[in-house]
Image: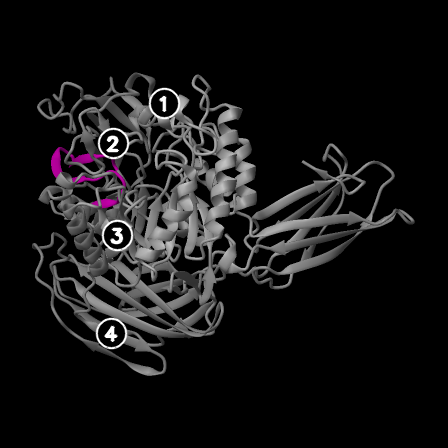
Amino acid sequence: MKLIRFLPGMLACLLLLTVCQPVTSKMESTQEPMRPTPKISTLVIRPVNFLSLDGDWRFAVDAKQKGEAQAWFAPEYDDSAWQTVAVPHTWNVMPKYSQYNGLAWYRYQFTLPKNLEALHLRLRFQAVFYLAQVWINGVPVGEHEGGYTPFEFEVSSLLKPGQENVIAVRVDNKINSVRIPAELRAGWSYDWWNYGGIVRSVSLEATNPVYLSGQQIVAVPHLTGTDQADSAEITSSVILENVSTNPFEGLVSFKILEEGTRQVVFDSGSREAVSLVPGQPFSLKLSATLSNPRLWHFDHPNLYLLAVLVEKDGQEVHRLESIFGIRSVELKNGQMLLNGESVRLVGVTRHADSPQFGLAESVQIMAADYEDIKALNEVLSRPVHYPQAEFILDYADRHGILLIPEIPAWQLSAQQMAMPKMQALVKQQLLEMITTQYNHPAIWAWSIGNEIESETSAGHNFVKEMIAYVKSLDATRPVGFASNRLYTNPNADATAYSDFVMMNQYWGGWGGPKENLSASLDAIHAAWPEKMVIISEFGFEPNWNRLWGPATSTLTPEEYYFIPDGTPPDSELADEQRRLLIREQMAVFRTKPFVAGAIFWTYQDYRTRSKFVMGVVDPARNKRPSWEVLREEFSPILIDALTLSPLADGKRTATISMYTRGPVETDLPAYTLRGYKLHWRLSSPDELTEFSAGDLALPTLAPAAEWTGEIPLVVPQSDIILTISFVRPTGYTVIERSYNAKGEFLP
């Protein structure tokens, strides 16, 4: 059977259907190469079905690699002695297999509903780490290499509607030097855990044999001012498939809706006739002009939905709905312009890792983490070294986080980058990441890797080739990579070929004395004055010098962040150094107007071979004091003062003064605040009794703006606490302070 991937990036405009009110639609035809003979002979129109295959699967480790020879994939194989596990799953959270790298098998038995007969069936895996081989009812379907990207197989002829079916998956998570992520040398590989298993969701999609296999949406606003546009041009490249044995004659139309209200804002108005030969993809290009669009921004993440409909004889054959946003990101003169405004942004990284679930983390874990991360004032992130779960991308779209997704080409050597197999794997993972994530408005740029030997000749060739490849898939977004070779001689680095600079910097640690941070940033700016800089990593690992550095006895606090030998890395003393680093390095970043963003490493401690402790929360998500420091350093608002008037007739007035960080040239983060509010709450000292609460709307506040407001309070006879919170339009608190009855700040 043939592996089919979701590839909207390959949507060549071979048949052109332009639909733009009030212009009349037109259609031109070009044929793609024929595919293998389809299996479905007649078109029986039935409702589309999506069947989740998550849940209880059978699981067994295959340490002796005997499973294939013993036909563990066969339907009749007796797996009753196997363990039952819940997929998504990784065996490395099981105590017995915590350290296991090798082969393991999963089996799933289910009855396929009879009403799915004659439908086109695709088995989809959101991610399997690392190498997956799949059988259905004993027949090999195919394999997929790469642990973080979705893939699917066409399985219409293998599944039996109304009968029991067995899916078997052999998973291999062995580490070696020709996989991505790769072993770098004997005994050392990427420094996060290689969680083996079916680590993300599995599903079966059943469509009519004529179906829409994907669309790639580009939305370009016509800006009339900062964060304002009078129109937007929307184009969508769509692929329509016919996997039956008969020609198809039908009609295609599309609409654009506001995603939340589902109010139609554009209707193609007419249904265009399409004619599909069997086994031959049909390419469409749809276009529309929207008036007065609602722009996507991290503080007002407005979303739209583009719905394409295929019909025949008045019946719906297939509908494809894709969410998108309308926004502009421009890199210009060392600045980042979001919807026309120069902004400087902040955030954190986060590994997909939790003690209970490892990489196969639940939606509840992801949601809780990202709610906390938004409370840290994150609006920008290079999430981590590999493609993220669909939930996280959707969360970023809906809650406002600008992302730079990356593939796990981590610390590749010059020799590895020169290998054709590695180059092919990198391109495969880039292709899968970009084509499946293309429509997310939260994604504004792509990263081709992290900390490669980018100063070498092979590194230069690799970066040039991969950036060109990414641009062939997506010409609308900037491309770069995270470099740790920019400390002393940036001119030698392949960052020269990137659209912007991403610097992993650990001055005061692995990089050298902390005082060199300012000069190194100036040297980068001198090398590429037109490029903006994102600090893609900065942070503190308490044992950095014990692993790869000088003896502690040679370090001084004027030059380095460090802790005495024997001090636990999760101690208060270690976090004190982390807090110091955050404050000192953010102060340096603020003085460099070309530093458009800073991303702290990392949100939580995660499982590593080096036992790094770098999070502002521990693995159980307990907050360290550095969490509060990072939140305040990342806040676009600072509270200047609060005063309480004398009590008169049981009433008092609280006067609060605040200011926004700025100007943009001298502060970070810095951006205009629109739609923010002040929330106040008057409560008992134990905060169990609320006496009153309310909100004050703030005006639009530019960077470096000041604001003063008054809150009338009815004060009870008992003691009180007044809590003041500034809140984003998305509902996340930016900064919060509590005061006693004397107006004194309560830490």
Q: Residues within 10 Å of mark 2 (few under 14, many from 20)?
A: some
Estimate the spatial distance between the alpha carbons at disc 3 and disc 4, rounded to whole Å: 47 Å
Q: Earlier in the sequence, mark 4 or mark 1?
A: 4
Estimate the spatial distance between the alpha carbons at disc 2 and disc 3, rounded to whole Å: 58 Å
Percent across and percent down for residue 302 are 47, 61
Estimate the spatial distance between the alpha carbons at disc 4 and disc 2, rounded to whole Å: 43 Å
- Numbered label attached to residue 491: 3
Q: Residue at x 54, y 42 (%)?
A: 631
Q: Amino acid at mark 2?
A: Gln
- Numbered label attached to residue 551: 1
At mark 2, the secondary structure is strand
Residue 604 lies left or right of residue 465; in this view the side is right
Marks 2,3: beta carbons within 8 A: no
Front residue of this view, candidates 464 and 222: 464
Q: Earlier in the sequence, mark 3 or mark 1?
A: 3
Q: Residues within 10 Å of mark 1 (few under 14, many from 20)?
A: few
**Residue 189 in view (yes/no):** yes
Q: Earlier in the sequence, mark 1 or mark 2?
A: 2
Magenta segment boundaries in residue numbering: 128-152
Q: Amino acid at mark 3?
A: Asn
At mark 1, the secondary structure is loop
Q: Relative to 575, does residue 345 appear above or below in the rendering?
A: below
Q: Residues within 10 Å of mark 3 (few under 14, many from 20)?
A: some
